[in-house]
Image: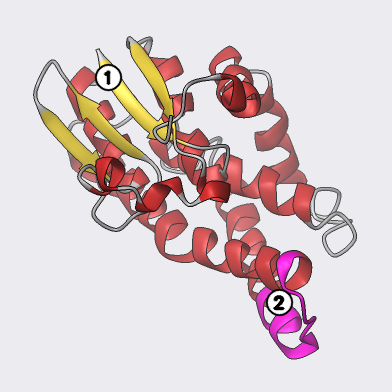
Amino acid sequence: MIDLYTWKTPNGRKPVIALEELQLDYTIKPVDIGRDEQFQPAFVAISPNSKIPGMVDHDTSVTLFESGAILQYLADKTGQLLPASGAARYSTLQWLNWQVGGVGPMFGQLGFFANRAKEKLPLAIDRYLTESKRLLDVLEQRLSRSAYVGHDEYSIADIAIYPWVVGVMDVNPTLLADARNTRPSMDRWMTALAKRPAVIKGMKILQDAERLPSIGT
């Protein structure tokens, strides 16, 4: 059994989708970041950086934080969603790291400055909007040459990127109104992923997280 400590954010949804795809037994342990539960000692013991998600695999006594590491661990544990060796493995890992190092931070900053910041700073909004659009263009270029992002099969790279792309467009519908209709390959990919049962469940499963006992309970 795996305990997943998470919340309803793009990073928080990534391991849920992977666990559903891999059909592993897991339990959701909500960490309400709106109530700063990520700073509670019980969670910091799992995630020293006080960021969700965190994971405890009781079968192997492995404890992990950082969503990219969790996705790679789950793929290696099961031998699925990540090639075992060769060029396809490293292509998948490079696109996973592209999300972790680029998409997540840039889309997150756009969301903060455009929506949550009390003071709207045009320079900051323009900076992160421009970079977010550039990253979407990179994704479009990649998907114009490949059915999926990492290699020619669905993988943890797709799982990592999809919630962030959906999230940035949902949070910024005016700023990114043309994001899909100007990027047909990305639209094709998003349409295909949105039909996957594991993706559907992973994107929705945390909507009722308030009803589950949280780490702060």
Image quadrant in which you'd find residue 193: top right
Q: Nearer the viewer, residue 22 or 34?
A: 34
Which residue sits furthest left?
A: 61
Magenta-tinted stretch: 116-128
Which residue sits furthest front?
A: 217
- Is residue 168 shown to the viewer in this render? yes
Residue 9 screen position, x and y as percent: 57, 43
Where the C terminus falls, by quadrant? top left
| Picture disc at residue 130 | 2
Q: Residues within 10 Å of mark 2 (few under 14, many from 20)?
A: few
Left or right: residue 19 versus residue 75 is right
Secondary structure mainly formed by the magenta segment = helix
Image quadrant in which you'd find residue 43: top left
Q: Which residue is mark 1?
A: 2
Left or right: residue 65 versus residue 132 is left
Image quadrant in which you'd find residue 59: top left
Label 2 amino acid?
Answer: Thr
Residue 17 screen position, x and y as percent: 48, 25
Where the N terminus falls, by quadrant? top left
Q: Is residue 37 magenta?
A: no
Residue 18 screen position, x and y as percent: 41, 26
User: Which residue is at a point 27% across and 45% down the rendered structure image?
Assistant: 65
- Is residue 161 shown to the viewer in this render? no
Q: Residues within 10 Å of mark 1 (few under 14, many from 20)?
A: some
Is label 2 in a helix, a strand or a loop?
A: helix
Left or right: residue 195 versus residue 5 is right
User: Which residue is at a point 74% across and 79% down the rendered structure image?
Assistant: 125
Label 1 amino acid?
Answer: Ile
| Picture disc at residue 166 | none
Is label 1 in a helix, a strand or a loop?
A: strand
Q: Earlier in the sequence, mark 1 or mark 2?
A: 1
